[in-house]
Image (tube, helix red, strand yellow):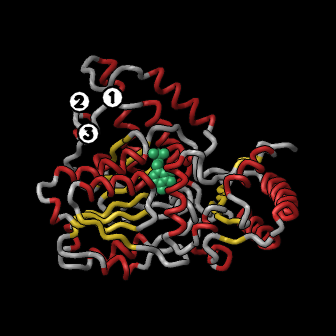
């Protein structure tokens, strides 16, 4: 077998063909603008509401609490950048983890520029936020906290439920908007939003086999946003609704939520073979306490072999893994996520991330690991490590 062997699911999933076909049929059958008041527009509107109701049912929330967005970047920014509407930025404190996704991190920097006060919480070197550290940063002026549920670089599962519970126990805890980025959690952790007392949470369809450019924001209560225009999505996200994407997003969400027991067979295989090869796990805890990590993401390095070089060598052999992309911004971002858990720059530069899916054939992992082993053995001779 010569591949392709795809291990970059944390970047994007392989589209589910059945879902793509259903979404296409839906968008062809109901092509009218849902805002048009003629029969065809009303029919499209009904379908839109049908998908909204199904998404709400899957997540165990109310239909009107689901906002379809153009992906998770947009959803994160909707929630964060609306604080720019706040008339008193100096009294707006925001608490966030240091390793948030760029779509959160960059929005936070914009808010800082506008005068809001940012309080960062750095995770421990196990890659996890400590709920007490998070709580210690909350002040009576805290308006918003944001936390990802599973880290996209390391797979570390964050104690989001505990953080929320701690915040709610404060006298002003119910006035703090708690936003959760669950993009890497969905499919790895069963989500029941009824039990998770957050104010908003975002998901992205393309990470779970759905189309790109579509996502979903759960919003407990309506909030003013900056995306004004035609009043769609309860006046919070203007723009003609993408019925193709919405249908694909909801079908992918339903499918992934129906999976219960998640197999750890790929993870066990990769962990044990990587240990044998002498890989440095990022963080080291990844191999010691796998239960604290998503089974679908493993980050490792073979210093001093740069991650970019290892990724290209693997790519030449049709094994596709993730690493800091050629784009400078992404590269900087990966380093930020790793160095903030205490990993030295020179090790973080060597990071490679493999991410897989339940349906990835085990044979693919076996073949990819054989190829990786050959590459590492060759590079050890060349670089003498
Ligand atoms: N949040 C996390 C944790 C992610 O991993 C990603 C994508 O990589 C995003 C947000 C952005 O999602 P989207 O591609 O839908 O904009």
Q: Is residue 183 visible?
A: no
Q: Where is 348 relative to 70, above or below?
A: below
Quadrant for the N terminus, please: top right
Q: Is mark 3 within 8 Å of ligand 1?
A: no
Task: Identify the residue at horizontal 19%, vertical 64% (top origin).
Answer: 92
Query: Is residue 247 in view from this perspective?
Result: yes
Q: Which residue is mark 2?
A: 230
In three-dimensional space, the C-alpha distance between marks 2 and 3, rounded to whole angstroms, equals 9 Å
| Whether residue 30 is situated above or below residue 301 in the rendered picture | above
| Coordinates of residue 47 in the picture (x, y in percent) | 38, 31
Q: With 370 as the anchor, is 144 left or right in this view?
A: left
As measured in the structure, the alpha-carbon distance from the residue carrying label 3 to the one carrying label 1 is 12 Å
Closer to the chain start, of discs 3 and 1, is 3
Is disc 3 in contact with disc 1, using a CB cutoff of under 8 Å?
no
Question: Seen in the image, is 317 located left or right of residue 266?
Answer: right
Q: Quadrant of residue 239?
A: top left
At 27% from the left and 17% from the top, the residue drawn is 38
Image disc number at residue 240: 1
Frontmost of labels 3 and 1 is: 3
Q: Is residue 39 above or below residue 277?
A: above
Query: Is 207 situated above or below 88?
Result: above
Q: Secondary structure at mark 2?
A: loop
> Residue 231 vs residue 60: left or right?
left
Reading the image, the residue beneath label 3 is 227
CB contact under 8 Å: marks 2 and 1: yes
Q: How dense is the environment of label 3, judged by Cα within 10 Å: few (below 14), some, or many (20 and up)?
A: some
- Where is the C terminus found, in terms of image quarters? bottom right
| Neighbour tally class for label 1: few under 14, some 14-19, many 20 plus, Cα within 10 Å | some
């Amino acid at each position: 077998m010569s591949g392709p062997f795809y291990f970059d699911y944390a970047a994007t999933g392989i589209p589910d063909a059945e879902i793509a076909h259903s979404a296409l049929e839906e968008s062809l059958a109901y092509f009218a603008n849902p805002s048009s008041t003629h029969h065809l527009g009303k029919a499209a509107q009904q379908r839109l509401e049908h998908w909204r109701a199904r998404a709400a049912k899957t997540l165990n929330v109310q239909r009107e609490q689901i906002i379809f967005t153009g992906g998770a970047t947009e959803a994160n920014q909707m929630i964060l950048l609306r604080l720019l509407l706040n008339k008193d930025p100096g009294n707006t404190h925001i608490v966030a983890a240091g390793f948030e996704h760029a779509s959160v991190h960059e929005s936070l920097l914009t808010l800082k520029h506008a005068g809001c006060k940012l309080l960062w919480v750095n995770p421990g070197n196990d890659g996890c936020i400590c709920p007490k550290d998070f709580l210690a940063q909350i002040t009576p002026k805290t308006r918003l906290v944001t936390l990802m549920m599973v880290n996209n670089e390391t797979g570390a599962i964050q104690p989001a439920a505990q953080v929320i519970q701690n915040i709610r126990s404060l006298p002003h805890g119910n006035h703090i908007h708690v936003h959760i980025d669950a993009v890497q959690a969905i499919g790895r952790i069963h989500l029941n939003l009824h039990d998770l007392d957050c104010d908003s949470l975002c998901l992205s369809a393309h990470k779970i086999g759905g189309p790109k450019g579509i996502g979903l924001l759960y919003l407990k209560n309506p909030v003013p946003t900056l995306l004004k225009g035609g009043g769609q999505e309860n006046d919070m996200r203007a723009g003609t609704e993408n019925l193709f994407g919405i249908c694909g997003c909801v079908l992918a969400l339903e499918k992934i939520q129906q999976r219960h027991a998640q197999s750890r067979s790929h993870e066990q295989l990769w962990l044990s073979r990587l240990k044998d090869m002498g890989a440095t796990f990022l963080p080291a805890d990844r191999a010691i306490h796998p239960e604290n990590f998503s089974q679908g993401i493993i980050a490792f390095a073979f210093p001093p072999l740069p991650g970019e070089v290892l990724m290209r060598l693997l790519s030449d052999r049709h094994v596709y893994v993730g690493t800091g992309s050629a784009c400078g911004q992404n590269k900087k971002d990966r380093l930020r996520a790793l160095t903030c858990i205490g990993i030295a720059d020179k090790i973080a530069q060597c990071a490679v991330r493999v991410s897989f899916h339940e349906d990835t054939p085990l044979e693919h992992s076996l073949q990819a690991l054989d190829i990786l082993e050959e590459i590492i053995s060759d590079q050890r001779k060349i670089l003498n490590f």
